Amino acid sequence: TVPVVLDCDPGHDDAIAILLAAASDALDLRAVTTVGGNQSLEKVTRNACRVLSVAGVTDVPVAAGASGPLVRRLRVAADVHGESGLDGPEWGPTTVRPSEVGGVELLRRTLAEAESPVAVVAAGPLTNVAALLLAHPEITGRIREISWMGGSTGRGNVTPLAEFNAATDPEAARIVFRSGLPVTMCGLDVTHQALVTPDVLARLRSLGTTVGDIAVDLMTFFGSTYREVFGFEAPPLHDPVAVARVADPSLVRTVRVNVEVETRGDLTAGATVADLARRTGRAPNADVALGLDADRFWDLVVGALAAYR
Ligand code: BDR
Ligand code: CA
């Protein structure tokens, strides 16, 4: 099993990413850290605790990291995730509480104390990960890989060319892509292949468990906002793809190319500029995910959620 930490901003798809990471046989989830993104830091931290509580996962520490981007102002995604950040389900009592230490410090400690290098899955803006690399450059040797849901080689979803996590903190994303660490970009190219179809929803419903029902409620709300905001028939389950990439790399087809993050363009800030045609001469620095084995991805997700009784 691969030791892993999950940095996230729950968020409907982040919630499923947490459930997948905690249940996957291939992964050993060591910490969950939160970052301001889909909603305020306070809300996404409460949401992470809610998800772990309903799942009965009480042995994974949670800590709140950065409240907003390194240099920009946070613009949350209430149109997609609601006022709470996890609108839809009726949440029961929250038993899991965030730790006293900050998110970046929990990441540092977890990496430093692990017996082998740890995979960092990032499912939100890269603020915490960049802050960790800036403040503790010696920690890079403890990072096995970074699997990030974010970016896109083409169109965006907040601006024409920028995806939400990249657009929220482009400066942080730039630091991570320039870190020299093994980075996989699981961007919209691949996450738009992870669609929560009526068939997937039926499989989740048929689990007949509390966690299965929560997943159905989450995906139903997410589906309705995705229909309203983007006109999608079925919503894309972005963040779990970055978890799946570590749990079973064979699910995701990647190309190794150079990716730079636009931080200045007045039309293009937050664009992840992937040199797919290899025209720049810049050295490859990322594995860019382009293809997903969707059937096996859904088997992985539904199978993991079925582990909760
Ligand atoms: C990403 O943005 C957030 O709204 C989702 O949680 C996901 O991480 C998709 O662009
Ligand atoms: Ca997210």
Image (cartoon, rainbow, N blue to C red):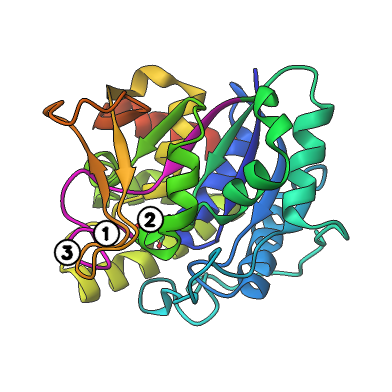
Picture quadrant where residue 199 is located: top left
**Pointer 1: what residue?**
162
Secondary element at tag 1: loop
Give the secondary structure at mark 3.
loop
**Tag 1 and tag 2, C-beta contact below 8 Å:** yes
Residue lying furthest bottom in this view? 83
Q: Position of residue 294 (x, y in %)?
A: 27, 32
- Crowd rating for badge 1 (residues with CA inside 10 Å; few <14, some 14–19, many 20+): many
Q: Which residues are magenta?
A: 144-163
Amino acid type assigned to the residue bearing label 1 in the image: Ala
> What type of secondary structure mainly makes up the magenta span?
loop
Q: Say how many tags the image has.
A: 3
Q: Residues within 10 Å of mark 3 (few under 14, many from 20)?
A: few
What is the distance, in whole Å, between disc 1 and disc 3 at their CAs?
Answer: 6 Å
Kind of residue at disc 2: Ala
Q: Which residue is mark 3?
A: 160
Q: Residues at badges 1 and 3 in contact (C-beta under 8 Å)? A: yes
Residue 305, placed above or below residue 167: above
For residue 210, side relative to residue 294 (left or right): right
Percent position (x, y) of residue 165? 41, 57
Which image quadrant: the C terminus? Answer: top right
Residue of label 2: 166
Q: Nearer the viewer, residue 190 or 199?
A: 190
User: Could you tell me which secondary element the residue under label 2 belongs to?
Assistant: helix
